[in-house]
Image (cartoon, helix red, strand yellow):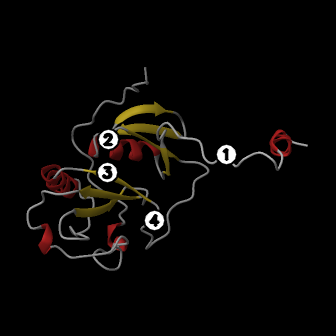
Amino acid sequence: MSVIERTASEAGHDEAELGPAKFQSLAHISLPCRDLEEGIAFYVDVLGGELRALGPIFASVRLAGANVGFGTQGCSFINDSAEYPHIAFYLGADELAHTRRWLMQCEIPVSNLWTRRGKEVLMFLRDPSGNVIELFCKDGFKDADKLPVGTSAGHGQAVNIDELRYTTWKRPKTQRSRVVVRDK
């Protein structure tokens, strides 16, 4: 009998249901990556992440307080036309407009801006490996109420996810630090 089976049988049927434990925080998100250096260039140089771990098949960056890891082996890549799974980041109105222009300078395709209720503004893009990223501005974006409207699944309604795939892009001239910064 395994440890898990023993623990389950020792709990018995008389014990009250425990329910879930309270998690402390999100540790990290891991994504598939076609090329590690390209992933680092995208998440560090384009999105502004800080390199946190680096190995031969895995790297991790801290971005907006979250650890985003990406690996090149043992991966499952997202299917064409899939909006889910994706990761999302909150930005202010000015930061969203700035990031949109910056991504276009880097020749990274971005979706049109869209809304769900006329107050918030969303935009999708993909990293070079095809992982979908949503940028979300909660409020304060001028004329948000005039943007195309979509539901919680915006693909096919307000945006076309398929138009965001790319194989080449323009890397920034300035390469940010590749020094790994470890947690204290």
From the top left corner, tell me how far across and down residue 48 is, in percent. 28, 40
Which numbered dot is residue 84? 4
> In which quadrant will I find the C terminus?
top left
**Residue 180, position as x, y percentages in the image:** 41, 27
Toward the viewer: 84 or 51? 84
Instruction: Find disc 1 in the rendering and name its residue.
Output: 18
Between 174 and 163, the one lying in front of the other is 163
- Of circles 1 and 3, the one toward us is 1
Distance of label 1 from label 4 (alpha carbons): 31 Å
Residue lying at 46% horizontally and 44% vertically, measured from the top left: 36
Q: Answer yes or no: do the residues labelled 4 and 2 have beta carbons within 8 Å?
A: no
Any mark on residue 115, and which? Answer: none
Q: How many labels does the image show?
A: 4
Q: Identify the image quadrant of residue 49.
A: top left
Q: Read off the residue under disc 3.
A: 89
Mark 2 against mark 1, which lies toward the viewer?
A: 1
Crowd around label 1: few <14 · some 14–19 · many ≥20 (10 Å): few
Label 1 vs label 4, nearer the camera: 1
Check contact, mark 2 vs mark 3: CB within 8 A. Answer: yes
State which tag comes first along the sequence, 3 or 4: 4
